[in-house]
Image: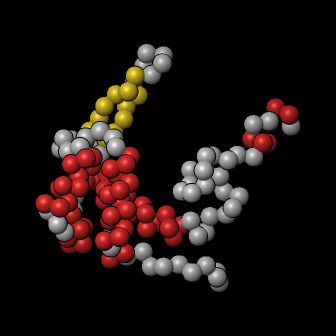
Amino acid sequence: MSSINFEPITLERILERKNLAEALRKVVSNKGGAGVDGMKTLQLRCYILEHPNEISEAVRNGTYTPKPIKRVYIPKENGDKRPLGIPTVIDRFVQQAVALVLSEEYEKIFSDNSFGFRRKTGKLKLPCYFFNQSAL
């Protein structure tokens, strides 16, 4: 049996004021475009203050429904366009609240030898042999 001390991943933990405040901070600092509802990231804080507990109650009651994704196309260097989906700011806020709790627990089981995009690990760190495949 593992000696790793996992905390339960619960709605209460996801919807804790401290976790929601961190999710809000991250969404606002990441900026990003408005989704299909037109709300900008800077408007999120005011929305939450004007509608206290609305989002968390909808999540808790199972009535929260994500909005459709806004599709935009980003030009590529070769002239093609890459599709990009932009969720609403509120959806990003909810996603971030969930991701913070999940990441906290999953980080406990990641190996120090796991490479990729992980919180607090800096840039992608790959061993030299990945870049020297022709030398093998």
Say left or right for 49 vs 109.
left
Q: Quadrant of residue 64?
A: bottom left
Say left or right for 74 vs 116.
left
Q: Position of residue 129 (x, y in %)?
A: 79, 42
User: Relative to the observer, which residue lies in front, 26 or 125?
Assistant: 26
Outermost residue on the top side: it is: 79
Q: Quadrant of residue 51?
A: bottom left
**Residue lying at 36% horizontally and 35% vertically, measured from the top left:** 84
Q: Position of residue 56 (x, y in %)?
A: 23, 68
Say left or right for 126 vs 76.
right
In the rendered image, the vertical position of residue 69 relative to residue 9, given as above or below: above
State how the image is colored.
Answer: secondary structure
User: Relative to the observer, which residue lies in front, 52 or 58?
Assistant: 52
Residue 88 visible? The answer is no
User: Relative to the observer, which residue lies in front, 45 or 6?
Assistant: 45
In the rendered image, the vertical position of residue 63 relative to residue 26, given as above or below: below
Q: Position of residue 130 (x, y in %)?
A: 74, 41
Image quarter where the N terminus lies is bottom right
Q: How many marks?
A: 0
Residue 98 visible? The answer is yes
Image quarter where the C terminus lies is top right
User: Relative to the observer, which residue lies in front, 15 or 24?
Assistant: 24
